[in-house]
Amino acid sequence: MTYALVLNSGSSSIKFQVLDPTADANDEPLVSGLVEQIGEPQGSITIKIRGEKYSVQEPIADHSVGLERSFQIMTEHGVGPHDVDISAVGHRVVHGGKVFSEPELINDQVVEMIRDIIPLAPLHNPANVDGIVVAREILPDIPHVAVFDTGFFADMPPAAALYAINAKVAGENGVRRYGFHGTSHEFISQQVPALLGKDPKSVNQIVLHLGNGASCSAVQGGHAIDTSMGMTPLAGLVMGTRCGDIDPGIIFHLYRTAGLSIDEIDTLLNRQSGIKGMSGVNDFRELRQMIEDGDTDAWSAYNIYIHQLRRYIGSYMIALGRVDAITFTAGVGENAKFVREDAMADLEMYGIKIDPERNDLPNDGPREISTDDSAVKVFVVPTNEELAIAQKATALAKK
């Protein structure tokens, strides 16, 4: 059997899977792993192989050490990168800028081009590059493919993609709406037509990727026509630690009046805002418990979250004109039934009716949570970005 290795490198972590690119979306990968706390005094590696979990706690100096140590553990159990047939290594890269709209076979020039985009994603692309460099050194004989989060949104219409600022300044500095979570939005939007029993080209849908990072998209006939995230992943919905849409004048106000530096404002809006900034937690299970215990900050944070989510759903219903389906995915979307219930509440006049019993069912594969007579179907579909990356990487490696 031929497998793909999928790598998602963060600033202090590496997530990876070895999986069959032809597998069903709900199938378990052969190997899944997580390297955490890279560069800290004590790191950890957790690897799941055929359902069995193996963990080590030890210092992990850098990404190279983390990946090599992970491969060593996999080799000890007969599933190392040279023990199984790996046809491609797929790398998640957050930002493709205006340069990359499709998966790209990686060579030295592509690596440098991704480096050039770092100013557009300074929190993500440097770690993505580190992972690519390390993996190519360890596995030089296997094709490596970059799959970009922004790719699915590259052909959005100008009315959705461009900002109303000076065109010359925007063009010279790459300022536009790029969108993120594109691999997930594309994957989900490809699953929904089959659930509806319709031709994908005729389906209008709204995809809600709700995790610690959150975004939504309007998809018409398989193509994204709008998305909530912008030039960076900071825009759009309220998220775990990100503020989502705010008046940009707030940034100037904090700089001039609060005396915060640009870096401090960056940290505030990206890491200290959102649900956590308002309530102190960013786990929706904890948030729910706090609400039940009468915490007013948690209740306020949740209401703001739902309000912003419903604003986007409403605007995308107008943008699409006709909506066939609304789909919830990612950690919160798949598991927080109260979020789905509140986001879809009192929308019967728009043809949206939720079945409470269906919504209460545990997360176990794609399912409909709307009533049989709901004009707009509402689904919960687990996302599988790793499988989507594996499929894209394998297809390109074969060319």
Image: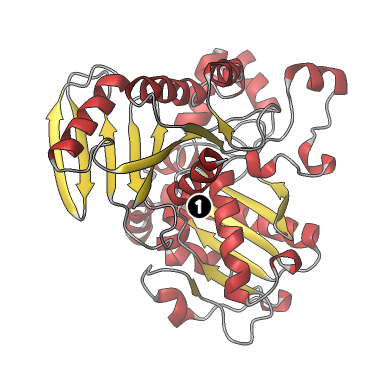
> Horizontal and vertical percent for residue 394?
49, 44
Question: Which residue occupies the foreground of this view, 25 or 277?
Answer: 25
**Quarter holding the C terminus?**
top right
Amino acid type assigned to the residue bearing label 1 in the image:
Leu
Q: Which residue appears farthest toward the right when viewing the image?
A: 167
> Dot 1, how many residues are within 10 Å of its Cα: few (below 14), some (14-19), or many (20+)?
many
Relative to 240, 167 lies left or right: right
> Horizontal and vertical percent for residue 375?
69, 80
Relative to 153, 195 lies left or right: left
Q: Is residue 229 visible?
A: no
Relative to 249, 288 lies left or right: left
Q: Is residue 391 above or below residue 203?
A: above
Q: Residue at x 81, y 44 (%)?
A: 157
Q: Is residue 365 visible?
A: yes
> Horizontal and vertical percent for residue 71?
23, 32
Q: Which residue is mark 1?
A: 210
